[in-house]
Amino acid sequence: MKNNSVTPALVVLVVDVALGVAFVLLPPVVMSFLTLLKDVFGVLILPFTFLFGLAGWSSDMSSLDSVMCGLTPSMLRHPFRAIIAAAFIAVGGLCSVLACGSPRAAHVERIIAPLLTIAAIGLMGVEVGVILLPALLLQLSALRYPEMDFFSRNK
């Protein structure tokens, strides 16, 4: 039996998985861009820094340093961990969507989806876990209700 309807729970699941991937991958990208910006400005400002140092002024781009120090949680030190966690989240979401497409089959996908989401939460920490909590709850409830149609009267 094939399920062709798109349920609100499936839409919430897909949106939450997309947000989870964005929240995992965006901080390393922003931090690498800021590091590149700091290096470029450091080279461009080097002659003026030397002249200002001779004049007695000292400024070593403290504003950019404060921005970078404010944006560095512990997960930004491990970009490969973030990439692996984003892959786990995306594959878990894909397994959920595929399992919802054929509710009477796809038992393996239905079991693997929450396991991959839990693995991603374990890799990235509590912050990502809070974001992925709705997706995890929907994936766990899909074990009991494979159609993910929680609002219909025909159960």
Image (tube, helix red, strand yellow):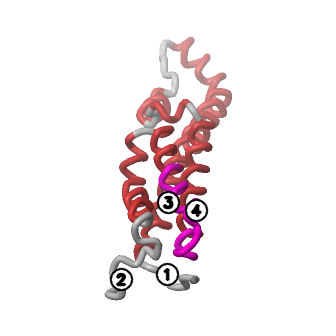
Q: Marks 2 and 4: CB-CB under 8 Å? A: no
N-terminal-most mark, 2 or 4: 4
Which label lies toward us, 4 or 3?
Answer: 4
> For residue 134, which numbered disc appears in the image?
none
| Residue 44 located left or right of residue 122 | right
Identify the mark nearer the N-term, 3 or 2: 3
Mark 1 vs mark 3, foreground winner is 1
User: Which residue type does callout 3 highlight?
Assistant: Val
Q: Give the residue type that dot 2 points to.
A: Lys
Left or right position of 139 against 28: left
**Image position of 144 with respect to 153: above or below:** above
Label of residue 6 in the image: 1
Start and end of the magenta stretch?
99-115
| Residue 50 falls within the magenta-colored stretch | no
What kind of element bears circle 2? loop
> Which residue is identified by label 3?
17
Crowd class of label 1 (few under 14; some 14 to 19; many from 20; radius 10 Å): some
Residue bearing the label numbered 2: 155
How far across and down, in percent of the image, does residue 101 sit? 57, 76
Q: How many marks?
A: 4
Q: Name which of mark 1 and mark 4 comes first in the sequence.
A: 1
Q: Residue at x 58, y 62 (%)?
A: 95
Which element is circle 1 on? loop
Q: Nearer the viewer, mark 3 or mark 2?
A: 2
Distance (Cα) linking label 2 and label 1: 16 Å
Nearer to us in this view, 51 or 8 = 8
Marks 1 and 4, how far apart in space? 15 Å
Residue 82 visible in image = yes
Q: For the view shown, which residue lies furthest in the bottom direction?
A: 154
